[in-house]
């Protein structure tokens, strides 16, 4: 189906929200807000406040409830703005944690592969065999990956990259080239490392951390990082990739993620599980960190409407009493 809707000016967008039942006591304030944020972007933060309607189920299967365009009674424009501002503050806190985790994981990879040789990240022996298999085109995934790293390094405007290019021939060693890696590069490297090397990197987080769990964490945090970096709503939407949970009793502070809730309401399906992983990793790399305490206070101090209460973000009952947050 082709998208045929036409652009609406801000005045018409406000009229539409009023028509759908949103209370907007200060139209000038709403107009200024939409000029800064945009109606379509803000609509992601108004969605939880839309009401449910009963419609016929597909294939004649009775009836089902779906979100309507109409807002729930009592929905105010401020509800959406407050949600928007809270989500923004949350993303800033998450980026603070992600930055430190990214640098620590990157350093761990450099230390593990750099001990093998200065170009350990280019050596097929560092990775699983399948990463060096010819796909039939005469190329391998490893070669394609290295070409991407080289292109990124050559185009870098960082002083260290320009200095290396101006003074040395050949590819840069891992401790120099890693300075231009993205989190996506880290995710790709960890996913394809040999078991021995993956276990060695995971051990830099915690000696007992299973390598498969660690790899799932990096993949999940890559999704969260991208969401934050692109300023997308983070609070109550499902994760693309859920972080794994180690076997019971291995890490007691993570066991509560196994609570028996199914589907998209399960703790591991929402941002809560990623927050727990961030708190765990930060506390391993930075034993004196107060990030988890700061985040706990931020969420407890927030006045949430029922539509976006912590449960909608995967937070289990009495989450604040869990050891990971104390």
Image (cartoon, rainbow, N blue to C red):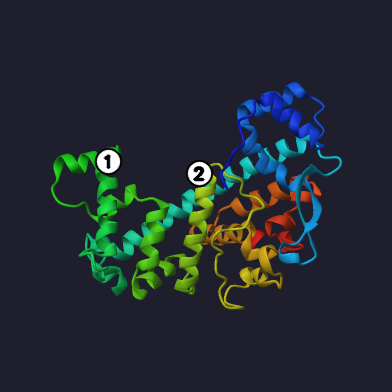
The x and y percentages for residue 64 are 78, 60
Name which quarter of the figure residue 4 lies in. top right
- The residue under label 1 is 155
- The residue under label 2 is 229
Q: Judge the density around disc 1: few (<14), some (14-19), many (≥20) Cα neighbours within 10 Å.
A: few
Q: Residue at x 39, y 50 (%)?
A: 182
Q: Is any part of residue 292 visible from this angle?
A: yes
Q: Is any part of residue 286 visible from this angle?
A: no
Say which element carries label 2: helix
Say which element carries label 1: helix
Q: Residue at x 73, y 29 (%)?
A: 14
The x and y percentages for residue 67 are 75, 51
Task: Say which of 108 and 35 sits in front.
Answer: 35
The x and y percentages for residue 314 are 68, 60
Q: CA distance from mark 1 to mark 2?
A: 21 Å
Give the mark nearer the N terminus: 1 vs 2: 1
- In the image, residue 230 sits, relative to residue 122, either above or below, namely above
Task: Say which of 293 and 229 sits in front.
Answer: 229
Residue furthest to the top: 28
Name which quarter of the figure residue 132 lies in. bottom left
Quadrant in which the C terminus appears: bottom right
Q: Residue at x 30, y 68 (%)?
A: 131
The x and y percentages for residue 297 are 70, 49
């Amino acid at each position: 189906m082709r998208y045929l809707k036409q652009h609406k000016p801000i005045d018409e967008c406000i009229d539409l929200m009023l028509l759908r039942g949103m209370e907007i006591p200060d139209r000038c304030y709403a107009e200024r807000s939409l000029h800064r944020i945009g109606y379509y972007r803000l609509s992601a933060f108004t969605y939880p406040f839309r009401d449910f309607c009963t419609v016929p189920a597909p294939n004649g299967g009775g009836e089902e409830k779906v979100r309507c365009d109409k807002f729930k009674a009592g929905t105010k424009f401020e509800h959406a703005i407050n949600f928007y501002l809270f989500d923004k503050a949350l993303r800033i806190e998450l980026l603070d944690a992600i930055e430190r985790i990214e640098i620590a994981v990157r350093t761990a990879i450099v230390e593990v592969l750099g001990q093998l040789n200065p170009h350990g990240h280019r050596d097929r022996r560092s990775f699983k065999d399948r990463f060096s298999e010819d796909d039939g085109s005469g190329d391998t995934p490893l070669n394609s990956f290295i070409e991407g790293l080289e292109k990124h390094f050559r185009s870098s405007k960082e002083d260290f990259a320009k200095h290396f290019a101006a003074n040395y021939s050949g590819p840069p060693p891992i401790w120099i080239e890693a300075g231009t890696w993205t989190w996506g590069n880290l995710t790709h490297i960890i996913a394809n490392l040999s078991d021995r090397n993956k276990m060695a990197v995971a051990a830099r987080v915690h000696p007992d951390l299973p390598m498969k769990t660690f790899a799932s964490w990096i993949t999940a945090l890559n999704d969260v990082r991208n969401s934050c970096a692109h300023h997308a709503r983070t609070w109550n939407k499902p994760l693309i990739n859920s972080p794994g949970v180690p076997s019971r009793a291995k890490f007691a502070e993570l066991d509560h993620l196994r609570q028996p809730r199914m589907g998209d309401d399960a703790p591991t399906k929402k941002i809560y599980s990623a927050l727990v992983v961030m708190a765990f990793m930060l506390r391993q790399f930075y034993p004196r960190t107060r990030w988890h305490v700061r985040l706990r206070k931020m969420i407890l101090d927030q006045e949430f409407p029922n539509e976006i209460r912590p449960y909608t973000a995967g937070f289990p009952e009495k989450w604040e009493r869990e050891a990971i947050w104390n």
